[in-house]
Image (cartoon, rainbow, N blue to C red):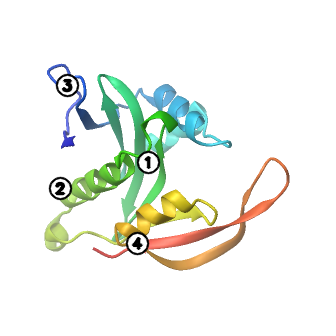
């Protein structure tokens, strides 16, 4: 996996995945990817202001010029949070989620300033308790459960699900 902080993927081998920052005008792409991954997906209208939030960034994973997933992170106040991470079903099982998180950590480190320039902030996320694949990834990467939000997720059938709050302390 090659981590790139550029939009240029024209000279890449067809099978090689790249990770690049999302452009300000890519909310339609991000909304489409989010819809492929989540039953209650974010719309383009919901994503647009997130792209403009101070401290927020989005990294897109591509292969052969086709987007396969993205991660949206917000940082500030000495910590960071993964707002969403998604990998389309056809690209799952290839550690793309792990690569997106790793690229986000590299981006956070590159953006650190002053005394904290060599330290990563703690990274938080929330995950549905039933999402075993995502939970396994997060544990493998060193995240720990630090809390629960009962009935946080609401499903179309009316059922509710607990969100686990997880933290990576680099």
Q: Is residue 169 above or below residue 65?
A: below
> Which circle, 3 or 1, is nearer the viewer?
3
Residue topped by disc 2: 110
Farthest residue to the right: give it: 158
Which marked residue is nearer to the observer: mark 2 or mark 1?
2
Q: Are marks 3 and 1 in contact (CB under 8 Å)?
A: no
Kindly identify which residue carries mark 4: 143
Q: Label 3 neighbourhood size at 10 Å, few (<14), some (14-19), many (20+)?
A: few
The residue to which callout 1 is attached is 53
Q: Quadrant of residue 36?
A: top right
**SS for dot 1:** loop
Query: Residue 65 appears at what percent x and percent y?
Result: 31, 22
| Crowd rating for badge 2 (residues with CA inside 10 Å; few <14, some 14–19, many 20+) | few
What is the C-alpha distance between the residues marked 3 and 1? 25 Å
Question: Mark 3 — residue?
Answer: 8
Q: CA distance from mark 2 to mark 3?
A: 20 Å
- At x 25%, y 35%, the residue is 18
Q: Determine whether, in the image, residue 57 is placed left or right of residue 109.
A: right
Q: Neighbour class for label 4 at 10 Å: few (<14), some, many (≥20)? A: many
Task: Decide which of tag 3 and tag 4 comes sooner along the chain.
Answer: 3
Check the image and report above or below for 46 versus 73: above
Task: Report how far apart the C-alphas of labels 4 and 2 lie in the structure.
Answer: 21 Å
Can you say which quadrant of the picture contains the C terminus? bottom left
State the separation of the CA atoms marked 4 and 1: 25 Å
> SS at mark 4?
loop
C-beta proximity under 8 Å, tags 4 and 2: no
- Assign the N terminus to one quadrant of the image: top left
Marked residue nearer the N-terminal end (4 or 1): 1
Labels 3, 4: front one: 4
- Neighbourhood count class around disc 1 (C-alpha, 10 Å): few under 14, some 14–19, many 20 upward: few
């Amino acid at each position: 996996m090659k981590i790139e902080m550029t939009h240029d993927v024209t000279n890449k081998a067809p099978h090689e995945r790249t990770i690049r920052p999302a452009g300000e005008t890519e909310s339609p792409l991000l909304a489409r990817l989010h819809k492929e991954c989540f039953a209650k997906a974010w719309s383009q209208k919901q994503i647009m202001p997130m792209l403009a939030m101070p401290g927020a960034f989005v990294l897109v994973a591509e292969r052969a010029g086709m987007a396969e997933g993205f991660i949206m992170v917000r940082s500030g106040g000495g910590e960071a949070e993964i707002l969403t991470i998604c990998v389309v079903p056809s690209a799952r099982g290839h550690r793309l989620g792990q690569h997106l998180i790793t690229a986000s950590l590299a981006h956070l480190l590159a953006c650190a300033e002053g005394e904290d320039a060599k330290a990563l902030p703690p990274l938080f996320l929330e995950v549905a308790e039933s999402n075993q694949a995502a939970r396994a990834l997060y544990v493998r990467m060193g995240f720990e459960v630090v809390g629960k939000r009962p009935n946080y997720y609401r499903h179309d059938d009316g059922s509710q699900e607990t969100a686990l709050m997880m933290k990576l302390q680099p």
